[in-house]
């Protein structure tokens, strides 16, 4: 649907996809990724000195800005992030950058911007001829530094994540998951983007960090970003630019009501996740960073059902070492005890990239050399992580989960590498839990169809509905243009899940869901009917799901499931389930009519 950007009395109302609930009102700042534009022109000889002065002043200003950012970051204790700024500060002094730019101004009589740009090209070309990952990284740093100097030369403000002030709302064309993690460091209170879908990792991170967000707005950057007041309603997927005073007041009330409901729901956190007839369905949390653990406990999670470890690899310049892996998982195991935590091995690719791992540019990244495929190819990277998990396994209850398994051969290859990692630790005399449970994600249709074969090789299944839906229905999960086709209740999906659950139980292994579907209370009764052992979700969703669970019986779930499986379309299914849920829980679900 194209945006209905309506200039109404109460402001410009934009409809997108609400991906992280809550309401925030604040000033909009555009996060700009465009390269600075300038007009290249010749100068007269008498202008040379003033151009060189402009150049020096701009470097001085840029260095001052960087120093301020560095101080702010250090003040907040994020030492790990500050060294990148040291690199940039040093590059501001780079002899080649400085001397060559000045030489061009003097000899070729060109303006500073032009000279600087050409110098950057020359430096980049020099870097290109060297085959070295470290140096390739430095090229990106030089580009960054030149961009900052150029912005100061042209008088245009450069806003990058590290420049942002707290308590603002970020408006951007797109944000990567790595960007989103950094927004949290800056305590940005909300964001709105042109691109994105509900199960994109940017959306998932926003939910985990509890930053209200609306994505897929198509053109919010055309309307906001210049410090206008905007409202983000992440629950309804609405953004209002320059709202009237009356609208702001109404949203303040809505915000209070939302907070009240959240607080009320927290009462469920300490209660058991059990139906009225005593069926226990474990409700666990998905996390991306370890800082989330205290929140997770507050919402009553019975452990971590999915730790997306790829976030350990983001926002840094080098790969995490075995020791870093070990320390992270040890902390996880200790902080979540007595519960368990499932550590999913590196699931890179798709919409998650890191600059220091050289994934080839692919036509179709969701189906490329990613996740377990990448790990099997890059065995040493994989083994460093596996050894870290194994070493940490003696500090609590950890389980290992392999992502993106497409069939048993791939699983056996990954298991062989796990065995190698174990042997290496044994040779070093380092203890680990030899019985650490191993699971696979069922998120590719071929894995679902061969679940009986996979079940012989593992201790549990975790159904990743985000990707399972993407691959089964051929819908790119990050593409806002096809988000209307992303249908969790498509009969193909329900049938697949049922089949996988039945196979797991026949094989006497446990099975859970860790995709975003698990978090939607609309489906809780269906999952109950299916007999799932575990649901893992963003922690904030746990109380709501628990409420449904505690007010129901297993029999109700089985009945609802049976009737649902007779229906032929996702739409019909949704209307039916909504109707039933609205009858059972009139306060929480709204009945829909077609
Ligand atoms: C999934 O695919 O459902 C899943 C949980 O993994 P991710 O969202 O990280 O791909
Ligand atoms: Mg997945």
Image (spheres, helix red, strand yellow):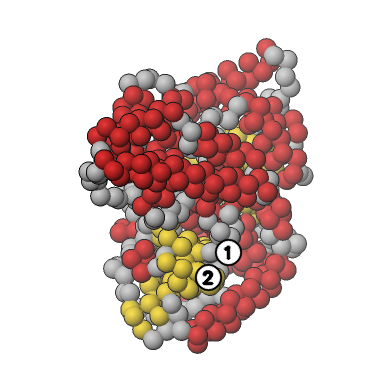
Question: What residue is shown with label 2?
Answer: 26
Task: Tell me if the residue at label 2 has its CB under 8 Å from ligand 1.
Answer: no
Looking at the image, how many numbered discs can be counted on the residues? 2
Image x and y of residue 85, in percent: 55, 39
Q: Nearer the viewer, residue 63 or 209?
A: 63
Residue lying at the far front in this picture: please name it. 46
Which circle's residue, 2 or 1, is located before the other in the chain? 2
Residue 207 sits above or below residue 230 on the image: above
Q: Nearer the viewer, residue 451 or 224?
A: 224
For the C terminus, which image quadrant?
A: bottom left
Task: Please say whether residue 447 is visible from this viewpoint.
Answer: no
Image x and y of residue 302, in percent: 69, 51
Task: Please say whether residue 44 is visible from this viewpoint.
Answer: yes
Image x and y of residue 25, in percent: 53, 72
The structure residue drawn at horizontal position 61% and vertical position 79%, both measured from the top left corner, is 257
Q: Nearer the viewer, residue 205 or 83?
A: 83
Residue lying at the far top in this picture: please name it. 427
Assign a secondary structure to mark 1.
loop
Image x and y of residue 271, in percent: 74, 63
Question: What residue is shown with label 1?
Answer: 167
Q: Nearer the viewer, residue 503 or 265?
A: 265
| Label 1 CA crowd tier, 10 Å (few <14, some 14–19, many 20+) | some
For the N terminus, which image quadrant?
A: bottom left
| Label 2 CA crowd tier, 10 Å (few <14, some 14–19, many 20+) | some
Label 2 close to label 1 by CB (< 8 Å): yes
Kindly report the distance in space between the C-alpha atoms of the residues bearing marks 2 and 1.
7 Å
Q: Is residue 331 left or right of residue 247?
A: right
Assign a secondary structure to mark 2.
strand
């Amino acid at each position: 649907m194209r945006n209905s950007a309506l200039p109404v009395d109460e402001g410009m109302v934009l409809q997108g996809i609400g991906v992280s609930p809550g309401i925030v009102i604040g000033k909009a700042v555009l996060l700009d990724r465009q390269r600075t534009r300038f007009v290249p022109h010749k100068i007269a000889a008498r202008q040379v000195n003033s151009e060189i002065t402009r150049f020096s002043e701009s470097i001085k200003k840029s260095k001052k800005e960087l120093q301020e950012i560095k101080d702010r970051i250090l003040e907040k204790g994020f030492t790990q992030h500050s060294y990148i700024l040291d690199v940039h500060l040093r590059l501001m002094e780079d002899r080649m950058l400085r001397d060559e730019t000045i030489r061009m101004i003097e000899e070729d009589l060109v303006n500073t911007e032009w000279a600087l740009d050409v110098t950057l090209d020359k430096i980049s070309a020099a870097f290109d001829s060297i085959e070295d990952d470290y140096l390739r990284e430095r090229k990106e740093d030089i580009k960054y530094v030149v961009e900052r100097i150029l912005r100061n030369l042209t008088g245009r403000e450069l806003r990058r994540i590290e420049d942002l002030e707290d308590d603002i709302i970020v408006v951007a064309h797109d944000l990567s998951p790595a960007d989103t993690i950094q927004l949290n460091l800056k305590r940005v209170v909300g964001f709105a983007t042109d691109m994105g879908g509900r199960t994109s990792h940017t959306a998932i991170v926003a939910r985990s960090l509890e930053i209200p967000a609306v994505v897929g707005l198509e053109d919010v950057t055309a309307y906001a970003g210049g410090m206008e007041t905007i409202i983000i309603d992440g629950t309804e997927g609405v953004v209002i630019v320059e709202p009237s005073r009356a609208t702001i007041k109404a949203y303040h009330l809505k915000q209070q009501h939302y907070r009240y409901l959240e607080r009320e729901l927290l009462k469920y956190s300490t209660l058991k996740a059990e139906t009225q007839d005593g069926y226990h369905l474990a409700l666990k949390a998905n996390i991306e960073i370890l800082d989330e653990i205290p929140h997770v406990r507050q919402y009553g999670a019975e452990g971590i059902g999915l730790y997306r470890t790829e976030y350990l690899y983001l926002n840094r310049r080098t790969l995490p070492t075995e020791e870093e892996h070990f320390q992270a998982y040890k902390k996880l195991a200790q902080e979540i005890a007595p519960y368990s935590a499932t550590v999913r091995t590196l699931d890179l690719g798709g919409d998650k990239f890191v600059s220091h791992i050289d994934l080839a540019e692919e036509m179709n990244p969701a189906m490329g050399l990613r996740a377990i495929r990448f790990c099997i190819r890059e065995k040493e990277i994989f083994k460093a992580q596996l050894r870290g998990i194994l070493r940490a396994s003696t500090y609590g209850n950890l389980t290992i989960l392999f992502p993106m398994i497409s069939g048993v051969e791939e699983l056996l290859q990954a298991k062989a590498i796990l065995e190698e990692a174990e042997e290496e630790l044994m040779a070093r005399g380092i203890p680990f839990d030899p019985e650490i449970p191993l699971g696979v994600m069922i998120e590719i249709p071929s894995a679902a169809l061969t679940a009986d074969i996979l079940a012989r090789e593992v201790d549990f299944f975790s159904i990743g509905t985000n990707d399972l839906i993407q691959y089964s229905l051929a819908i790119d999960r990050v593409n806002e243009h096809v988000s209307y086709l992303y249908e969790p209740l498509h009969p193909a999906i329900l049938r697949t899940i049922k089949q996988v659950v039945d196979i797991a139980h026949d094989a006497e292994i446990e099975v859970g869901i860790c995709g975003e579907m698990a978090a939607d209370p609309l489906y809780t009764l269906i999952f109950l009917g299916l007999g799932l052992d575990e649901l893992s979700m963003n922690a904030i969703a746990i109380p709501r799901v628990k409420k449904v669970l505690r007010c129901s019986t297993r029999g109700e779930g089985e009945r609802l499931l049976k009737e649902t499986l007779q229906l032929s379309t996702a739409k019909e299914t949704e209307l039916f389930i909504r109707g039933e849920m609205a009858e059972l829980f009139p306060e929480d679900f709204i009945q829909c009519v077609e």
